[in-house]
Image (cartoon, rainbow, N blue to C red):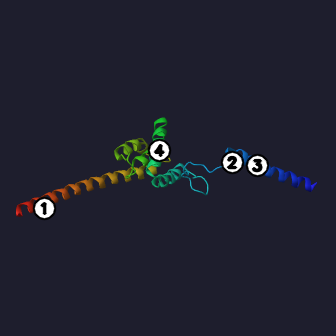
Amino acid sequence: MRLQIALCCLALTTGCALMTELFPELETREPTEPAPWVQPGGPPATDVENLVQYFGYVRKLPAADLTREYDTARQAYNRARSDYSRVRFAMLLSLPYATFNDDGRALDVLDPVLRKGDGRLYPLAQMLGSHIQEQKRLNANVQGLQQKLDALKSLERSIIERSR
């Protein structure tokens, strides 16, 4: 009886190997999609944790994948303007190195969540809104400093021209 079971098992494993050789499309492969932003150790407990992990995930994406992620988040935001989709979309809009960066629009997208003043995503939205406003202020300072530097360069050039 044991011999018969062993032979059946051997026939089954040999048959499976033979099937994958004859039909390669049956072979299991690794998925070609990028890894999700959820880290090992179980899914996040709350939407806030999920969005924080998501931000860590999108910060590391190459430009092409980031653009695809932006399109996905934009479509989700356009379909359902929930607090979750608003914060997610605003996170992407606020990425400083992204081609689609738009701090003003990110603040507009967050505004309804911030105006409510409550809800499970309000603290994260408040932090993100403060971060975006600080980023805008710093960008304005950089532009002002750049203008001053350009004026100094122009003044230096004119002094050099006069001394000739």
Q: Amino acid at mark 3?
A: Leu
Name the residue that disc number 2 marks.
Answer: 27
The residue at the point 62 percent across, 51 percent down is 30
- Give the alpha-carbon distance from disc 4 to disc 2, as whole Å: 29 Å
Nearer the observer: mark 1 or 2; the answer is 2
Please, which residue is most extreme toward the front here? Answer: 22
Badge 1 element = helix
Residue 18, disc? 3
Q: Are marks 1 and 2 in contact (CB under 8 Å)?
A: no
Q: Amino acid at mark 4?
A: Arg
Q: Is residue 144 left or right of residue 21?
A: left
Mark 2 vs 3, N-terminal side: 3
Q: Are marks 4 and 2 in contact (CB under 8 Å)?
A: no
Residue 130, disc? none
Residue 156, disc? 1
Mark 4 vs 2, N-terminal side: 2
